[in-house]
Each structure stands twice: as structure tokens, then as C-alpha cells.
Amino acid sequence: MSRSGADLALLLLGGFRTLVDSAIAELAASGYEDVRPVHDFAMRAIAAGADTASELGRRLSVTKQSAARTIAVLQERGWVTTAPDPRDARRKRLEVTPLGFEVMRTGEAVFDRLREEWAAKIGATELATLEKHLTTLVGPQPVRFDSPGWMAHDLGE
């Protein structure tokens, strides 16, 4: 039976949602309750140099206010902190804490385990073929966080 383009989009979205929901549940069971994908995206952007709310907002294509709300959540959880800027004493810059890096590493390990589960379900060769085809279709960097509108909802959760 032939599927529509909309069906394909929903299958891809469903695959993403299945992996993310499973990862969130595993992270919660590991003691990291309320971790959301946006927290990981924000910490990765901060680790890569987005050291202010304005810069984080630009990197995630959200408002400075949304970025500031996300930063507040990350700081409350001890995943991000501020430090004096060595170039400008009046300025504070964002940094991912060791605990924040631990959360990211734990999340990466969870996704690796979930990938192994998928390989067990459909076969390692089939999964590798699927990944190869998806890479051909969407490119080697499937999501660019600095693309306008890549995420349509508020970051403050």
C-alpha cells in the first residue's frame, strides 16, 4: 500500500517522538526529572559559545525572553551557571556546569541504548540503511539549531 507524503512526515515525527519520550522517561528514572530536549539544545549551544541570553536566543531562533526563561530553569537545576567574563568585568557569561555536562552525557548514553533497541527490533543492517537513506535525504546535519523557526514552541519549560 502506497503512503502519502503526510504519512511519511508523521512516521518520521512519530519516530522522533518515540525516541524522545523514551529518553525522557529513562532520564527521569536516572534522577533527571523534567529534562526536555530544549534543555539539551540550550546547553549544547551554551557549550559551543552562546554565553548570553541574546546569543542563546539567536542560536535557538527564539526571543531573548524565551532564552532567559530557559536559562533560569537550567540555573535552578544547577546545569548552567554564570561566570565573570575575562574580557569585560561588567559582563557575566553563561557556562555549562559539570552536572550539566553529566546530564548531556547521560542523555547521549540513553539515546545510544535506544538506538541499540531499534537495531534489535529491525536488524542492525536495516537500521544502518535507514540512517544512510535519511542522511541522503536530509543531509549530514539533520537539524540546524540556528535555522529560523526550527522550533515553534516556547523554551521556558
Image (tube, rainbow, N blue to C red):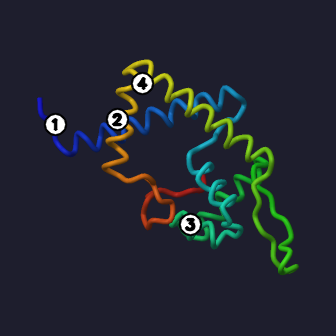
- The percent coordinates of residue 84 (x first, y second) are 86, 70
Q: Which amino acid does label 3 sit on?
A: Arg
Secondary structure beneath label 4: helix
Marks 1 and 3, Cα distance to the nearest angstrom?
Answer: 35 Å
Q: Is 106 above or below relative to 146? A: above
Q: Is 156 above or below relative to 125? A: below
Q: Residue 114 shows which numbered tag?
A: none
Quadrant of res 86: bottom right
Disc 1, disc 2: CB below 8 Å? no
Q: Residue 124 shows which numbered tag?
A: 4
- The percent coordinates of residue 90 (x first, y second) are 85, 80
**Closer to us: mark 1 or mark 2?**
2
Q: Earlier in the sequence, mark 4 or mark 1?
A: 1
- The percent coordinates of residue 83 (x first, y second) are 84, 65
Q: What residue type is labelled 2?
A: Leu
Marks 3 and 2, Cα distance to the nearest angstrom?
Answer: 29 Å
Quadrant of res 126: top left
Disc 3, disc 4: CB below 8 Å? no
Which quadrant would the N terminus be assigned to in this image?
Answer: top left
Determine crowd level at label 4: few under 14, some 14-19, many 20+ residues with C-alpha closer than 10 A: some
Q: Residue 3 shows which numbered tag?
A: 1
Residue wearing tag 3: 59
Q: Residue 130 shows which numbered tag?
A: 2
Q: Residue furthest left?
A: 1
Marks 3 and 4, Cα distance to the nearest angstrom?
Answer: 34 Å
